[in-house]
Image (tube, rainbow, N blue to C red):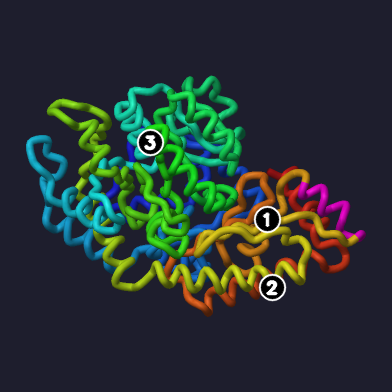
Amino acid sequence: MKKPSYNSLNELLESRAVHRHQIFEQYIDPWKVRGARHLQTDCKFTRAQGAYLYDEAEVRYLDFDAGNGVFAIGRNHPVARSVMHELLDLSPPNMVDREIPLLAGLLAETLVKYMPKAAHRVLFASTGSEAVEAALKFSRVLTGRPRFLFLEGDYHGATYGAMSVTGVPFISDKLEPMLPGCDAIPRNDLERLEKELAQGDVAGFIIEPIQGLEVRPLDQAYVQRAQHLCRQYETAFIVDEVFTGFGRTGCLFATEHFNVEPDLLVVAKALGAGYVPVGGVIIRNDLYNKVFDRPGIFVHGSSFEFNDYAMAAGLATLKVLDQENLVENARKNGELLAQGLEELKERYDMIDEVRGKGLLLGIQLKAPESLRLRASGRLMEKRGLLGHMLMVQLLAKHQIITAAVSRTNILRLTPPLLIDKSQIHYFLESLSSVLKDAYRFPDGIGRFAAAQFLRSLRT
């Protein structure tokens, strides 16, 4: 096969753009291409800025997904972009084994300043999954114990260790057996938690304070008592804030809502500003010193753990969060968005529940009670596609990007933290329009289901 020849990246992209489906289908994942065609969710975006993406015709799309929460400060933020350009111009040596990297130290210093009370240190990683792996390994070395506990329904990543403490069956069931000694327990069940911890063999208990997939917050009393029990039984209390961290819930970290201080706090996603992946584990200093009590102790390492570009992206993200007061913006506008969704819930019984905090919100959907819509609604509900229905309609009719979480009948909203009131009002008006259309005679849900069925025959 002849290798492609090109003079610039832009030239390469323009010359091959017409073949993007065939290339992706042949060399990566044909099912992703077919699924996008089937749901009509395949857009060709050419640029992005802040809370908007633009297609080839310069049609503007409002982003209420933010790249699965990655673009918390918006896409291509000028501060982060400037930092990336500046570092490229500096031509740093980067990742030199015999150098103590300043940028890594500066990012760790900044992260630790946000932590309450006790001193902390940071283990860096490339992704959220890798950061979870680092937390698990640290807990084992710290305690010398074999087991981990996690909660049913929580998601902690796609690497093997992280999947072993993930309580989402459709993610891991084809890869079983998972790592031994990883046991799921029910959410908010303190009696079961204490029973397991009392056995004295649990290295770490890992939680999501608010589930990223289904947006289910834990009870505050449960989280506080869980921390107390972990301290009592000398088990590492690990809080995974890969999704909830850096302002997403209206506090810098979701643990602030629960008034707890984890032993290990796992972060990633938004920290890299969408430019370079970066994750980490923020660890209480007293625990860190117990593990690294002499030279040569190995717990975690990564080729890219001190990547200058990742560290600079992290510093830029934290600077923007502070300068633009985005955490407070997420709190205020999250309340506005949640209030608007609750009002829609009173008008449309398809909305069963609104969950979450700040700008991490989940809309749980159900079949309408109307006799005219009950059959088609229950069919879509049974297949877990009500969230997909709203996602597709919001995209096609109102140019709004959202996420439908697998087959759970959940529409998840994670807009960038810089979202403003006018954009929230537009989203609420658009969602109301889509819901109204679903109730419209003749059977809007049935029409959508039939159209999807016919399209599946063609794809």
Tell me if I can see residue 263 in this picture.
yes
Magenta highlight: main SS: helix
The C terminus lies in quadrant: top right
The residue mark sitting in front, 1 or 3, is: 3
In the image, is residue 377 part of the stretch drawn in magenta? Answer: yes
Q: CA distance from mark 1 to mark 3?
A: 33 Å
The image quadrant where one finds the N terminus is top left
The residue indicated by pointer 1 is: 364
Name the mark nearer the viewer: 2 or 3. Answer: 3
**Residue denoted by label 2:** 343
Quadrant of residue 327 within the rendered picture? bottom left
In terms of secondary structure, where does tag 3 sit? strand
Amino acid type, residue under disc 2 in the picture = Glu
Mark found first going from the N terminus, 1 or 2: 2
* Residue pictured at 77% horizontal, 49% vertical: 381
Find the magenta span and give its range. Answer: 371-381
Mark 3: amino acid: Ala
